[in-house]
Amino acid sequence: MSASPTVLILAAGQGTRMRSATPKVLHELCGLPMVLWPVRAALAAGAEKVVVVDSPARPCEAVLPQGVDLAVQPQSNGTGGAVQAAAEQVSADAPVVVLSGDVPLVSAEAIRELVDAHAVSGAAATMAAAVLDDPTGYGRVVRDPDGAVARVVETKKAGDATTEELEIKEVNSGIYVFSGAALLDALPRLSADNAQGELYLPQALDLLRSDGKVIAAHVVEDQGLMLGVNDRVALARVRAIAQRAICERHMLAGVTIVDPASTRIDVDVQIGQDTTIEPFTTLLGSTRIGERCTVRCSYLVDCTLQDGVSVGPFAYLRPGAVLRDGSKAGTFVEIKNSDIGAGTKIPHLSYVGDSDVGEQTNLGAGTITANYDGHAKHRTTIGSRVKGGVDTSLVAPVTLGDDAYTAAGSVITEDVPEGALAVARARQANIEGYSERRARQAVEAKSDSASDGHGD
């Protein structure tokens, strides 16, 4: 890429059409606040500096990664005012890219391409343009005979553009790269002499053009530049596109996703080769899945699966769950903050929380770790090659040694030594003739009820 740019990301708008107490750019998109998508794209593009322009409440500050600067726009006075708020961060010697925090799908490749095209053109400013089959509602890019931008014609109201201008399919994306010196020269001259009384960044293009400087437009193939988010309908539309791209990235890397349309995968999820993700699976946060795993119709959040792990269907793996090589979490199994050893199986209908489980252990159906005493959480330790009976409750803190057994239906409250069988249940007693006695009592009760109040 040409000289490393400063990238300004405008994120101070409240987004009232979102109908939300949460600022628009902090709404979640595939596991990240929306504003972090252009931030990451700028960093990946090799930006020398990334500056997010925020409102005085500074809601973005808490989510920005280290090394990303924050500028505050003191009042809501338009895109020009937002760039003015970051002017101290702009160098006259470096190009300046202006992005929007609510246009999340801009790619690093598109940023690099735009900066390179700007350097080649020698223009004072270069806008990213796109050619759309249906350009309705977008400002049309009108070029002069030399190919430079003569003007951008808005088309939101009838009469804004001529019939010939409406035929133009090249539109302005609202993303720009400026010469730093040219931008710093134009910013103080922006005027709020318009119906909204705000400062608009596109006026800087008009000012530079009136100075005799060249304004260029570079057509970028990445249609993500055109997908802004103003309401939740648009957010859902953008999310669907981002989700499809995430699934395609994994599939091209060797992951089988049986039905991408019914699969939700956050952007930071990692999946190894030859793993299969069955329909209706949700993989969230920083979940890590190794090679040759199978995940069936399950919900995974911030967990780690090593190679050859089997999960589901209908499993719930919560933050801190680690399943080591070849282990299994079966049907309706919930695991939280636990380390499950290699080859260990938790086949079905169990809850394992705050536990450390050794290798080659098998926990029977209905195993429950009772890890909370009403005041604090406690850990359960289960050794290797343990055989847990069905319907076993382990009341933490408790330790089961290697090769131990638990009898079905036991409530384990004390440590079980290595190789021992723990039986913790009441002794069975069979009451002979119980069924007949119950039936006789029912008949007698019915007879007594019929006679009450009818003895006259």
Image (tube, helix red, strand yellow):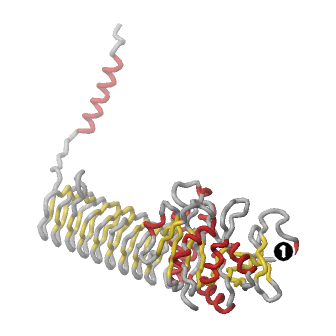
Can you say which quadrant of the picture contains the C terminus? top left
Could you say whether the residue bearing mark 1 is in a helix, strand or loop?
Answer: helix
Residue 252 at x, y = what percent? 54, 84
| Residue 346 vertical position relative to residue 205 in the rendered view, above or below | above
Query: Of 155 and 119, which appears nearest the observer?
Result: 119
| Residue 448 vertical position relative to residue 400 in the rendered view, above or below | above
Query: Of 242 and 89, which appears nearest the observer?
Result: 89
Structural crowding at the residue carrying mark 1, measured as other residues with C-alpha within 10 Å and reported as few (<14), some (14–19) or many (≥20): some
Hey, what amino acid is under mark 1? Glu
Which residue is at a point 18% across and 66% down the rendered structure image?
A: 405
- Dot 1 corresponds to which residue? 165
User: Is residue 349 visible to us here?
Assistant: yes
Q: How many marks?
A: 1
Q: With 455 as the anchor, is 146 left or right in this view?
A: right
Q: Residue furthest right?
A: 163
| Residue 203 vertical position relative to residue 351 in the rendered view, above or below | below
